[in-house]
Image: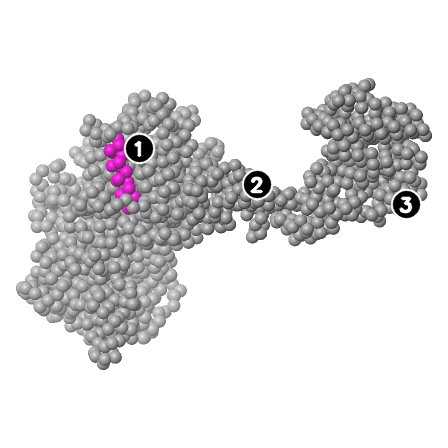
Amino acid sequence: RLYVWSYDAALRGHGGGGEDGSAGEDFCSYAVPSGQCVASVGLVRPKKGVFTDAVEWVLVVTTPEEVQLCALAFESAASVEGLGTPDRNGGSRSLRLIPTRFSIPTDSVPMLSVCGTDDGRIFLGGHDGCLYEMAYDNPAMMGSSNLGGRHRGAIAGIDDEDSDYLGSQAQLYYGSAEGMTGLLLSGTKRVLSSVVFGPMADSEPRRPRKCRKVNHTSTGVSGFISSFVPGVILNWFSSSVKAGPIVSMSMDAERSTLYALTSMGHIHAFDLSSSVPSAPANSSSVVPAPAPPRLACTVDAPASARRYLDYVARGKTYPPGTSQSSSIANISFPGGGIGAQNGVGGMNGARAILKIADAELQQQQRVDQSRRKVSGMKAGASEVAGMLHPISISVVRRAESKSLSLMAITGGGLRYYLTTLPLSTSSIRGGPANLKPGRRFTLCHVRAPPPYSATQNGDITIESGSGGGAFGMMNGSANPSAAASTAISPGIHPSQRAGTRIVAEQGFAGHGATLLALDASRSDPNAPLTGDAIVAMVPDYSQPRSALPSNGIKRAGITEVVSLPMVESSTSGDNPAILPGGRIWDIAATSPYDSNASDPDTCLARLFFHSATPTNTELSVGLVPAYFPPPKNRRIEGSQQARGAQSSLEVASASSNSQAANAFTASAFATIYRLLLGQQPPRQLQGAPVSVAAASIEKEPSYKISKRIGCAGTGFTVHPDSRRLGSSRSYSTSPYRRPPSGNQRTNTRPAVAAKSSRLSLWLLSPQVAPLSQVVSQHLAVNTASPSKLLALNSGGMHCFDNKSILDSLSAVLMKSTSSNMGKDQNIRSFFESYGFSDGCAMCLSLAVLSGSDSLRRRATQAALSFAHVPSMVLPSADNPSAGIVGFNGGALASGHAFRPSHLYNGLVALVSRLLRPIWYKAAVVVTEGQTLYRRRQYGGGKRVLPARVELLLDDETLETIRQPLATLQAMLKDVFAPAVESVPGAKKKQSRASADGDAMDVDSNGLSHNNGDQHLITRAMQYQARALPHRQMAGRPVSVEKDLEAKARMTEERNLHSLYRLVSRTSQLLTLMSQLHRAQANPALPEIEWGLLHGLTYCQLATERSGQDRIETLLTNLVSAGEETLGGHFDATGISSSAVEADNLSAFLSKSCYLYFSAGSRLTYQGFRAANSALAYNAGTPQRVALANRASAYFRAAARHWYNPSSVTGRLLRIDVDANRGSSAAEKEYEKTAKRALDHGSPFARAVAFLMDLHCVGAAVDVCMICASNFGGVRPRYGDETANEIELIGDNDGYADGVLSWERGLYHRPLNEPSVSAPQPGTPGNTSVVSGIEVTNADALRTCHSVLFCHLTELLNAAHQFVDAPALAEEMVSVCSSSSDVRFLRNLYEHLLTSGHVEFLLRIESPTLENWIAHEKKDTFLLAQYYTLHNLDWLSGQVMWKRATTVEEKVPLAERIDCLTRACNAYQSAQTKATTASSVGSLIGAMAQTGTPQVRRPSVEEINRLKSQVNEQLDIASLQSRLLDAILASDSLVNDVDASKLDALKTSLIPVSDMYNDYAGPLALYDMCLLILRTCHENDTDSIVKLWKSILCDYTIPCRVRDPSAQTFLAELKRGSMLEEEDIVLDGSAGPAHANLPLFEDGGWLPKLKDRVLGLGKDLYGQGADYTFPLDLIVRTLEGLRRVYAPSESSSFTGSMQASWPVQLLIDVGAPYPVILEVYDSLIHRESNGVNDTDAWLRNMANVVGVLRIWVGRTNRTLAGSGQIQFANGGIGNKEQEDASAQLFRAVSSGGLLHQIDSYKASLEACVSGNADEIASLASSLMDCENVIRRSFL
């Protein structure tokens, strides 16, 4: 029969029930149905889903023939009234032991040990040395009909008399591959039937097996044989029996390793880490079996220990090498040879152990020989446990050691410290890979038992033992002096060496203690069986001792305190150390922390131990990027998102949390109001609910709180990406896209929402930190179920209290009768034993954690009594640091360092232990929601599920951690009031305003920094330091000691002040996290932006400014978003449903979380409330105006507190805005910045948008300017700002009562005061505000300006849409331009310029603008436009003239000409306008800055003079431009000009002489030379003739001619030109060298010559320098060329009565007809009167007649027989007609023309040698011209 009872009830004092379980319900029994004896019993966890929640454990009962599974259930008192044991919550539960049908046969192999895993796997240790597993089904796969019986509904899977639990529809994993091979290897009983009858057909239904046994250590052959051969027969041939039966097993869940101990002393290590979980319960496929345990390594513990001891006995200082046998462990000496010797009592102790082991071996051999003689049987195991043979094994938790994994206790009391970890595993930061067992055990240490001995009556005594120590308080026996007693050296007592054996029957190690059950009567057959003695050993955490008294060897390792608990608890008896009840069967420990439980104590302990300190590399990564979920407004019917267009003027009034139908209605009404009324609609209409389409719109949350919490056993969800991250990175931000599935096209699916950053494993699942009991003992204070040790024997269960050091201290404090704790000798002994710092830490732990007021008071008094005082000490050689802790500042004297008091060290230790569970752990982990896609046939589209939020702490655990911190904060505030109530060392008047905002450092701004006294705290010390030289000179002594004491006290107080800040911030942070959790569940409040806290540790949130910024952003958005998004739904009282909840939340945060919830957040909330209320009224109503003014006041006051750059910008990670600088996209960058701030919840951007909706443009500008002043701008002043703020939020600034003055706004100020001379935004001088965040002050300043410019641009662009827009824009520009912030004004000017609103920019009359245009932009044209717009044309002309003539920079010639042209126009305009004196006077102060040479108004005469000078320079510049074009048009000319000269010609104004001498002349640019002479009015006849000859020869020679007369004429023409060297040859005599010359008679030169002469004539003639166009020379040359080129044309000219082409060319040039007539008249007179060359004379006379005909014809007069004379250009123009008529009128009026005609007629009549017809024709033409002239003008 098996008996089970709840020891928890017995420990609580509740009585047990009867055997049948009918009474009490905390005691029950179980009778094996077969009646066989119970071989072993194991208590394991059940599989998930097999039983209901009432079954917390299952009991595995083994008999020689079968193994059965029983459910151990605890039913609540509601099911069984009046019965049961109280649970931890005060209720009662009934114990039920219910058999199930889960049973397997043993096949004649008894199962000697049972062990289970947390996931429900059951392992059995067989007598054959094999490891078996009992696998049973998951009933979730079965039908509900299989759950029957009277316990159905409460417990599933329990045996039922009326229903067969083994349903045919259940499924079971088989563990092997299908087929015969798998069955053979599995060793199943179906092998034989399959061999005999064949395999089961596929169509035959398989009846799943409910439970089966799996052998994990047998081979395939043995598995086949065991299917039909009894196990008792197989034991004779099994190889596993060589190591002996498995008598004990222990599961290491942390390392996934199963240890098995055999009777022969072998230890097996099985690796379970490769096991895979089963398939889901609802899967239709066969569930795959978990991977079988892998035998990693085996160790022969006795042989390995013998090898270890042999080296120690020989005095080896180094361990032996690796043995060839794999069963022999590696040997390691972690403490060196001395440490190994100290563990076993030196070399002699090792030899004594080996001698005893050898004697036992000889005795065993004799026993084996006698057995073989009697029965012929094989030798078996020794009946008595040997000295080196292990009797028990215990797992060493990772919290106890980072290297060791197992401890084995031998029959001789030895302890083997083993490890299966690889030797390279030396860090606790290793991942799961290096926690797997290696290929060989390592024996790290062997420790002998204490030197106990046995008396004659069988009692146990300890030589030189101590009765107390840390374990001396067991069972409430307080012996404080025992802690300071002499420690005991381990070793074997001489009595055992002589042959008296003391055998360890049982051993236990764990929970900081080791227990041995000793029996001294086993070696004496005649001794009576009285029982076992209990020996307890615990580490001694008291002060270290220099030497051990037994042998004087220096200690290496931890000293143990040994005690006999029964001696201390017994009052009488012959054998006080013996535990009554006989032999002890087992020893176990109870832990108050259940690894699978979720109560606060267990969660806190789990967090505490899983708290390995991160490395510097891990901590240096910085903050995890925030996660921003995608928008959640989705249409259910389709794939399109609900979108709505909104005006930028009312973007703030759009409701982000309203339904899409309301948004549509608001847009419709807004459109009507804009079109009909030209104004904004009232807010009531914008928020009117409409039912249409409401069903098609769904508002989904962005976040969803997960039930999984980080402090629970499961911990945070670990993403596969997190496992790939190394320790150098704490997060991963690699992009993620949903992969396509199946035949889906990759380009048909959009990318999913951006995923949250993947956190590293050290952040999600911190490694276990090995911590001593001193560090972790505070966790057991006030624990409902303290840790106890249980021993079981025939007399029952015996309980021993495993009291901690705190328990001992509590007993000492409560038993003290002294009114002064410092005078109590027991308390003093305690402090001296454990150290004063640790003593203070323990007393403070009791003062904070204890539930007894008396104990808290006594503990506080004791800590203060032994606190000691801080001091300034000189470092010694042994201690160079001299205890430097928290020193802030330099030492007063050279070489001194600060040593804190023991009380401060204790406080630091306590705070670190209280914060350790959460400090480097992520408070919130956010995982992006899954994206669900809808099939195309159903409309397509996608839906993103809410992001999953996992919190580290649940409410109960959070309160468990917060309460001690709150108590400690109150104690610090009460006990250390001088250090807490004010900032030590700071001036009182500056204690509130001197804080620099750093969360951890004490303020230092209040200290004096003059005369080198910055390191001196008090004013008295400053005076003393200044007087020190005078004292030394006078020979007076210096009180250095007092100065050092004062400095030490001040430093201590400052450190205490910093510690108080840390505690208070952490306490409020925990309160804030709890409140956020509650607010998330409140539907009346907006969602918490958990993504801002993603991955941030409590350390970052409490100590870093970046964490403070994230929280402040979250809280500001939380309290303000509710009023903004739901502000349209008002009730009759004008208060929305969310307003009450938001008010409550704001009030709570102001009172309880004021270190995180700033005054700026409160003012922001009030501003949004007032703005929403104002928008509820129509525009222009008094209510709206009053509320708008109120909102403006709130926002102005709130803007003074917006110091958080990330909150202002709306993003935590900086977006590079400089990437597109210089492109067109950069001009709209302000729009992107403003939109980003508004879209991402910037309270600043939303506030400005609200003010713009209210048409409070002045307030909007003020808010922008005030906010910008927090990041480097100039703050505008509005009277007494402090008084205004007090008026808005109350006299106490909204804080709760009791808030210290220096705490007000402490963490809501900028780190550094912004400077006006700070660099411009975006310059390299801007650094990050805090490490890990890339949002800078420059980004925030840019955002402030961008938001303002965005709204300003919208107003300027909306002038044609809204009636009020122009006036609002004018007002906004006026307010902006009146700012005193020069940097902002520059940005404003730049924005207006780049946005295209230049007219608004130039209309601003400001010297700052003028200076900005002149010096920063250096835009001469813009400055000239500014002057012109303000009626300062003369200044515009001077600016343009200065720009055109500047020599300081290279200006393109075209720009210089443009500037000169503009200057001429400006001076011309200045002549017609009068400049007012006021306009001039307002700019005289700025003229000196702009560099304008003229600062007074010039007179009209001066303007005319300046205009003339500019015109002259313009003419010269125009010539230079023509010169440059001529040079650039020819590659040869470009090559001929020097590069520097050519560059000067392009970018500067060249003097006219240089143009003639250096460019035009050397380059043979004859045209330019003539133009230069004309411009300079240089009448150099020889040069002009030479140039014209060169020009006329340029197109004709060199050439070939046919007519010798042409050769003669051309030769005469080139004489005196620059082409005299060119050749003119006759065509007949031209040789090969001249064959390529052009032929003159071809006439190719004529068109070019005409064009050139015509162009030059128009440029030169009639420009005041007609001498540069010598008509006589030109006419003679052109007529000569005409004559020699075409003689036939010359001879027939008179017949055509048309003017020659030279005449027509002169007319086209614009020469007056009288002048042309005069030139040809001179030619006529120059020729002889028909004597020598009549033909030439007639030709000239024909030209004269032609000129007259053209002249008269252009007056539109009709000539007889000829009609109108046609112009060369084919038409008659009015201007030409008027000019010709005027010239003809003047010539006729003077009488000279008719007289000259008469002279021509007389000459013709006198000519007798020419052609008579030609002469007659000429005379007739003259007559016709005369007649027309006389008819028209006479």
Three-letter amino acid code at disc 1?
Leu
Q: In front here: 1205 or 1346?
A: 1346
Distance from disc 2 to disc 1, alpha carbons, whole Å, reads 50 Å
Image height check: is 1764 above or below 700?
above
Q: In front here: 1316 or 1150?
A: 1316
Q: In front here: 64 or 1151?
A: 1151
Answer few, some or many: residues within 10 Å of disc 2's Cα (few below 14, many 20 plus, some between 14 and 19): many
Where does label 1 land, which residue?
Answer: 1254
> Residue 1133 at what x, y percent from top left?
19, 29
Q: Which residues are magenta?
A: 1184-1201
Tell how many labels: 3
Where does label 2 land, which residue?
Answer: 1464
Where does label 3 land, which residue?
Answer: 1632
Secondary structure beneath dot 3 equals helix
As drawn, which residue projects farthest toward the top? 1761
Q: Nearer the viewer, mark 3 or mark 2?
A: 2
Secondary structure beneath dot 2 equals helix
> Residue 133 at what x, y percent from top left?
30, 47
Q: In the figure, is residue 1619 to the left or right of 818?
A: right
Which residue is found at the position 77% from the left and 40% from the top?
A: 1670
